[in-house]
Image (cartoon, rainbow, N blue to C red):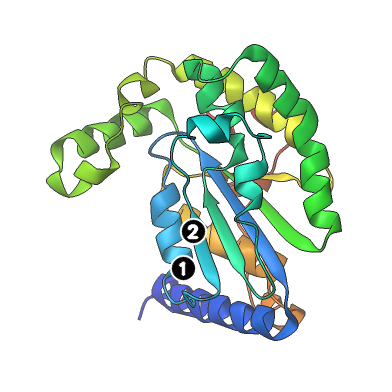
Amino acid sequence: MSDHAAEEDALQLGLVRMQQAMAASGARAIVVLEGRDTAGKDGTIKRVTEHLSVRNTRVVALPKPSDRERSQWYFQRYVAHLPAAGELVIFNRSWYNRAGVEVVNGFSTPAEQARFLADVPGFEAMLVESGIALVKLWLDISKEEQAERLERRRTDPLKALKVSALDAVAQDKWDDYTAARDAMLTRTHIPLAPWICVRADNKKRARRNVIRHLLRTLAPAEVAAEVKAPKPEVLFPFEMAALEDGRLAR
């Protein structure tokens, strides 16, 4: 067995032990998974949840809001999916739609977007202060890698269910998405709920480092102590310098 294969087995066992500890203690955790189109969110979630309990793990990927939901407080439909004791909830895209997709494609007003950026730090502080562990991950890829992945989506019948209407504009609006990402990370990276950035051009390496981070963040000390630290060239806390020094794609 290769070193990578042995580590991946150990990481999967670590996730199981983490969830066993959460179930025993009643801990609650949220993972917010964001990133550019084709950044690997689905594959990352599949690897994280592969051996976890379906009773204690929920993946939330909400569709376009209904007219009724659009009339509600913006965070309301997300609050309904927050974890109870012993649960891990992974948001495959989240309330941060308002800071990304909605900004670039005009799905909400500038006033609504500004209100979101002002409100979200307080909302997340309330979650953390209530005892919920919150991990926010931004998966970042290069423009060239995204183009290759979009082409594979278009030509591989097995990827047909991943194709969306927004794929067509992902490359054309690359710069707009970059500006939206920069504003989101800058405005919503707070001490209680920091952003963790993941360079995800290499999918397997990105997933491995994400799981390392989750275990070192959410698992009990005796489990976390057995896990290697994520590689800083792959996974790192957001900082302003990353917008200019090449760690985040331009």
Q: Residue furthest front?
A: 68
SS of the residue under disc 1: helix
- The picture quadrant where one finds residue 167 is top left
Label 1 close to label 2 by CB (< 8 Å): yes
The answer to whether 99 appears left or right of 10 in the picture is right
Name the residue nearer the viewer: 162 or 189. Answer: 162
- Rendering coords of residue 197 (x, y %): 61, 43
At 69% from the left edge and 73% from the top edge, which residue is drawn?
85
**76 w.r.t. 242: above or below:** below
The answer to whether 183 appears left or right of 130 in the picture is left
At 83% from the left edge and 59% from the top edge, which residue is drawn?
130
- Callout 2 crowding tier (Cα within 10 Å): few <14, some 14–19, many ≥20: some
Q: Nearer the viewer, mark 1 or mark 2?
A: 2
Tell me the residue that label 2 is attached to. Answer: 59
**Could you tell me how far apart the alpha carbons at marks 1 and 2 are, in whole angstroms?**
9 Å
Name the residue nearer the viewer: 85 or 184. Answer: 85
* Res 194 visible: yes
SS of the residue under disc 2: strand
- The picture quadrant where one finds residue 191 is top right
At 71% from the left edge and 55% from the top edge, which residue is drawn?
134
**88 w.r.t. 188: above or below:** below
- Callout 1 crowding tier (Cα within 10 Å): few <14, some 14–19, many ≥20: some
**248 w.r.t. 85: above or below:** above
Q: Which mark is residue 107?
A: none
* Res 244 visible: no
Residue type (three-letter) at the residue carrying disc 2: Val
Residue type (three-letter) at the residue carrying disc 1: Thr
- The picture quadrant where one finds residue 2 is bottom left
Name the residue nearer the viewer: 35 or 103. Answer: 103
Q: Which mark is residue 49?
A: 1
Q: Earlier in the sequence, mark 1 or mark 2?
A: 1
